[in-house]
Every structure is written in structure tokens, then in C-alpha cells.
Amino acid sequence: MNDVKPVSVAIVNVGSGDWSGTYVDGELFLQGHSLSENDFCKLISKYRYFHSHIEKIELTDGQIEALGFSLPGNLNDVRNVL
């Protein structure tokens, strides 16, 4: 019997296209100037089961600046600047 629970995934992008990040169950999984297919393979390999909806959040340059030009470790901190 499979006791692995599905995880929630959120993808955060900055509107200028300069920065992206992926959160799993509200915690930062990875971030960088772009997310590659390889990054998503790592995500799939590690977690395997996902909720059917992937949340997508777009930030403005001003919002990422308010976060210190880097994504915080917790997704709720991202939501606080929206």
C-alpha cells in the first residue's frame, strides 16, 4: 500500500522574467534565473505525487524587491507582498 501523500506545488515568477521559484507544501524547493526541465525532473523524482492544481503566482519587480530580490523560504511570505 502506498502511504505517500500528494504535495501541493506553487510556481512563482517575476513579471520581468528574471527570477523563478518552486514551492512544495509551502516551502521553497528551488529558485533561480530560470527553471529548466531538469529542475522539474528533480521535483518529480523527489515527490512523485502532486495535488491536481499547481498554483502560479506572478510578482512584479517591486514585489521581488520588497522580498530582498530573492524568494523567501516560506510561500506565505510571498503571499504577504501580493
Image (cartoon, rainbow, N blue to C red):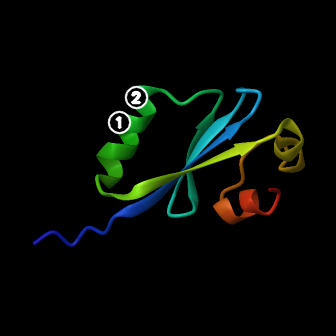
Asked which quadrant contains residue 62, the reply is top right
* Residue bearing the label numbered 2: 38
Q: Secondary structure at mark 1?
A: helix
Three-letter amino acid code at disc 2?
Answer: Asn
Direction from residue 76 to residue 34 in the image, left or right: left
Q: Residue at x 15, y 69 (%)?
A: 2
> At 70% across and 43% down in the image, what residue appears?
58
The answer, for residue 12, to whether it is visible in the render is yes
Tell me the tag on residue 60: none
- Amino acid identity at mark 1: Cys
Residue at 65% across, 60% down: 75
Give percent across and percent down for residue 16: 77, 27
Whether 11 is drawn above or below 74: the answer is above
Quadrant of the drawing holding the C terminus:
bottom right
- Which of the image's four quarters has the N terminus? bottom left
Is there CB contact under 8 Å for labels 1 and 2? yes
How many numbered marks appear? 2
- Would residue 74 be seen by someone viewing this image from the given angle? no
Toward the viewer: 76 or 69?
76
| SS type, badge 2 | helix
Residue sitting at x 45%, y 34%: 39
Single out the residue that lies furthest toward the front. 53
Query: Residue 11: percent from the left, percent from the top?
Result: 57, 46
**Taking 73 as reference, is 21 above or below it?**
above
Q: Residues within 10 Å of mark 2 (few under 14, many from 20)?
A: few
Q: On the image, numbered disc 1 is attached to which residue? A: 41
Judge the density around disc 1: few (<14), some (14-19), many (≥20) Cα neighbours within 10 Å.
few
In the rendered image of this protein, does residue 13 appear above or below residue 5? above
Q: Is residue 14 left or right of residue 34?
A: right
